[in-house]
Image: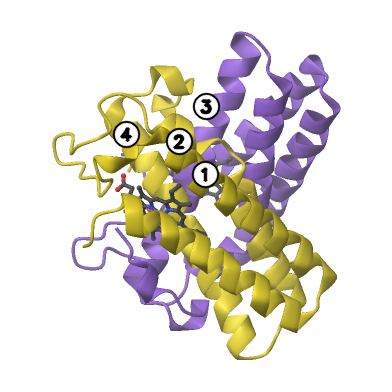
Chain colours: A purple, B yellow
Amino acid sequence: AVALASVASAAELKPEDQIQYRQAGYSFMAWNMGKIKANLQGDFDQGQVEAAANAIAAIANSGMGALYGPGTDKDVGDVETAVKPEFFENMEEVGKVARNFIAAANNMAEVAAGGDQAAAQDAFGKLGQSCKSCHDKFRADD
Amino acid sequence: AVALASVASAAELKPEDQIQYRQAGYSFMAWNMGKIKANLQGDFDQGQVEAAANAIAAIANSGMGALYGPGTDKDVGDVETAVKPEFFENMEEVGKVARNFIAAANNMAEVAAGGDQAAAQDAFGKLGQSCKSCHDKFRADD
């Protein structure tokens, strides 16, 4: 748990706080991906899909790159990270993967606002693919 | 860490996953509150404030109430929760506090898009107050 009192500008954040905040962002996106998936498989509630897509897009656009500062490349005390060393050695590739993800998240939000279920299915597939392509390269397996 | 594979509709989520997802949402909002605060105290970067405010508003509107299902009122195994029993005994008051928070988050996003720093300061104060009024009633102290 990260206390509210510990927040400050990203530059001042301790490495262990940066790790926990980035994990929080990913985790909250995963919850919202799950909601979109459930809506595509069952009853399609456009409002819920739109809210979930907006949360993912806003998190994608929030500048999470600032949470990969010095000292966040390995576990800090009992705060464990699954990031791979490759992330820090290949910032150009990270940027490409991240821009692709942001574009897919923005597209998902736009499509969700439109309300077309088939288009939402397609946008969801592309978005999930963009998560996976980052994990395949830069996140260690559990 | 909550695995991507474990996501499903909110109704199907295990209590311990619900607890971790809600903590992730709050934690990620706290990071973004910290960024807005730093911008108000130092150089004011309108783009960063707007992105942070959008993340908070989208999380506020994502339906986190679904993460307070049965069995999430107390620790589950080693997943600890700070929610107070009062939360589940007083849903009308929770709803009031939550609606006030959502309104303050939407207002912050609107004001941030406008770019007026004094207005942003005011909106930020009100938003922080809306977090605090929920914590005072429904979250246990550390």
Label 1–label 4 contact, CB within 8 A: no
Q: For mark 4, does the 10 Å Cα neighbourhood hold few (<14), some (14 to 19), or many (20 or more) residues?
A: some
Q: Residue at x 60, y 8 (%)?
A: A42
Distance between mark 1 and mark 2 Cα atoms: 6 Å
In the drawing, what numbered circle is on residue A34? 3
Q: For mark 3, does the 10 Å Cα neighbourhood hold few (<14), some (14 to 19), or many (20 or more) residues?
A: many
Q: Residue at x 77, y 30 (%)?
A: A112
- Badge 1 and badge 2 in a common chain: yes
Chain letter, disc 2 residue? B
Label 4–label 2 contact, CB within 8 A: no
Of the image marks 1 and 4, the number of the one nearer the N terminus? 4
Q: Nearer the viewer, mark 4 or mark 2?
A: 2
Which residue position holds label 2? B92
In the drawing, what numbered circle is on residue B96? 1
Relative image position of residue A51 (x, y in whole percent): 67, 36
Q: Nearer the viewer, residue A85 or A45?
A: A45
Name the secondary structure under disc 2: helix
In the drawing, what numbered circle is on residue B88? 4
Q: Nearer the viewer, mark 3 or mark 1?
A: 1
